[in-house]
Image (cartoon, grey):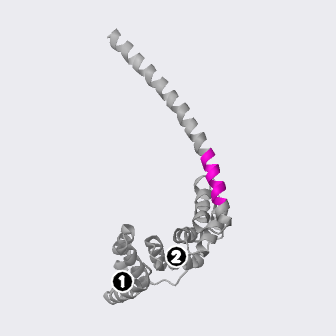
Amino acid sequence: MIIRQNFNYILLKSLIIIFFLLCDSLSSIAQDEIIDLETRKKELTENAYKGDAESQYMLGRLALETRNPPDHSTAVYWFRIASEANHLKAQEMLGAQLFSGLGVPANPKEASIWWHKAAMAGSSTAQASLGVLYALGSGVKKDLVESYKWLTIASLNGNKAAAIQRDDSISLQMTADEIREAQKRIELTINQIKK
């Protein structure tokens, strides 16, 4: 019994030492990452001012992901610039910021414009977002046929949540004629989406 207690004590002591060694090395890694992050941010900023949309988008992401609290205003600034250069992910993110009113006054109508651009460029996230906007009538006229259309297109592009929203909510509120109309619109819109 005493031998077992000594063994447990030694094991516990060893684990504590290993824990502190790991914490010290993790702290060192975190400091290295901060230096790398600052270097990366400087490179991105230089490229962003030269007109590189990917760098602009990444600066927007950094404003959200590396600050506590997130700097939504800076994120919106960079997402807008990248969006104007037709950066797909920036358009998705700008739409989300505009819809939720983070960093700017809420503007679902403008969110719908950016999400429509991204949706027509093939973004399943933007397609699903449009489907939700049409279901809510937020920023656009409430239209279950359009909602069904966009949610279906998003689901065809791999967005499983869009299919669930369509099947468990939207389609239950529609008539058979409305669903048939949505299916016609789906085919027309798919042919217009950039691949």
Q: Position of residue 46 (x, y in %)?
A: 67, 60
Figure quadrant of the N terminus: top left
- The residue under the point 36% across, 69% down is 158
Question: As drawn, is 2 to the left or to the right of 19?
Answer: left
Identify the residue under disc 2: 115
Circle on res. 116: none
Q: Position of residue 45 (x, y in %)?
A: 66, 60
Residue 95 versus residue 173 in the image, above or below = above
Q: Position of residue 85 (x, y in %)?
A: 59, 74
Disc 2 secondary structure class: helix
Residue 194 in magenta? Answer: no
- The residue under the point 38% across, 12% down is 6
- The residue under the point 41% across, 85% down is 189
Residue 38 in magenta? Answer: yes
Could you tell me how far apart the alpha carbons at marks 2 and 1 are, in whole angstroms? 24 Å
Q: How many marks?
A: 2
Question: The residue under label 2 is which amino acid type?
Answer: Trp
Question: As drawn, is 41 to the left or to the right of 91?
Answer: right
Residue situated in front as seen by the camera: 118 or 145 = 118
Residue 28 versus residue 123 in the image, above or below = above
Q: Please state the extent of the stretch shown in magenta in the rendering.
A: 35-45
Can residue 147 be seen in the rendering of this structure?
Answer: yes
Residue situated in front as seen by the camera: 23 or 147 = 23
Circle on res. 174: 1
Question: The residue under label 1 is which amino acid type?
Answer: Met
Disc 1 secondary structure class: loop
Figure quadrant of the C terminus: bottom left
Q: Residue 3 sits in which quadrant?
A: top left
